Amino acid sequence: MGWRISFCPNTNFRTMFQVRPESELECRHTIKSHGRQLARDHRHDWLILLLLVVIEITLNVINPFYRFVGEGMMEDLRYPMKENTVPIWAVPLYAILLPIAIFYLYYLRRNDVYDLHHSILGLLFAVLITGVLTDAIKDAVGRPRPDFFWRCFPDGREDYDRWGNVVCHGKPSDIKEGHKSFPSGHTSWSFAGLGFLALYLSGKIKCFDRRGHVAKLCIIFLPILAACLVGVSRVDDYWHHWQDVFAGGILGLVVATICYLQFFPAPYHNEGWGPYAYFNAVEELRSNPRPEDTMNMHGTNQQRSAINSSLADSNLDSTFDAMESGRK
């Protein structure tokens, strides 16, 4: 009796977190069975990620360009210094760890290591590329923050050189940070991480399946709304001008989209619920089935036959018992 590989049903809003039957052979790409080979195949990508981390650290260590700031320019830079509403340490929590937790939750339901690996890899690339671009532009532009006056002159006494440029006597760290306004790093990182998460969820729940389930959009807009609120907080805290936030949001969202499309089809695609590598693995399995997979499938069919036979015997015994009870 022949057998065939049954494809995993397209995930949607209802079936996204349902456990799949073990008989769906192509879904069983676990960390234990395929993780080591997958990491080996992408070892160069992980090395590039380490290089991006080194570059990001370097860009934060070096001094930015100290742009000319004249006395007449101080009128727009006298906003008070405030603490961050969203602290720096919180950004990796919601922009990186939260999406990874969701990716892993999906892996527990589908046992698809390709989805887990590529979603994490794509997310890290999106965030780190965005971070490198953001900090490189920050250092090159050197735009003063809205609270630059109080960073430069914490006692309120102004001092300028013969060319009219500021002579700051505040803390060197405050002055250095005061020249990193454009673009907003909080905003770009938020849109990179949460934007990637929004794309990921839109593919998993098939948000654009043309069935008119507008309620799905609420799930997609939630991460985007959170990123927008982070950007608004940067203006409210007087750490950034609105142009800085707008540019950071566009930068993060564009990079997130590019990185996402490297690993996954577009969310509106029929196969937008899974990574390219998953479908390639399934196609390879269909073309060249392994002997152990064939044995597993035959074993599954035999188990099904045994279960059906036991159920039939059980029903038959129940019928006999009922007949005997009737005689009595």
Image (tube, rainbow, N blue to C red):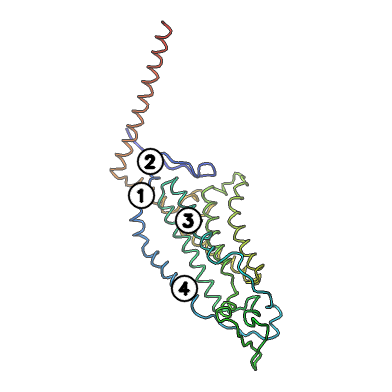
Location of mark 3 (residue): 100
| Amino acid type, mark 2 | Ile
Q: What secondary structure is found at the residue carrying circle 3?
A: helix
| Amino acid type, mark 4 | Ile
Q: Are marks 2 and 1 in contact (CB under 8 Å)?
A: no
The CA span between labels 3 and 4 is 22 Å
- Could you tell me which residue is drawn at 53 percent across and 41 percent down? 14
- x%, y% of residue 168? 61, 85
Nearest to the eye among marks 4 and 1: give it.
4
Location of mark 1 (residue): 284
The CA span between labels 2 and 1 is 12 Å
Nearest to the eye among marks 2 and 3: give it.
3
The image quarter containing residue 223 is bottom right
The CA span between labels 1 and 3 is 28 Å
Location of mark 2 (residue): 5
Location of mark 4 (residue): 57
State the residue in front, 234 or 31. Answer: 234
Q: Please identify the residue farthest to the top as the structure is shown.
A: 328
Q: What secondary structure is found at the residue carrying circle 1?
A: helix
Q: Are marks 1 and 3 in contact (CB under 8 Å)?
A: no
| Amino acid type, mark 3 | Ile
- Could you tell me which residue is drawn at 38 percent across and 20 percent down? 314
| Amino acid type, mark 1 | Glu
Nearest to the eye among marks 4 and 2: give it.
4
- x%, y% of residue 96? 50, 60
The image quarter containing residue 307 is top left
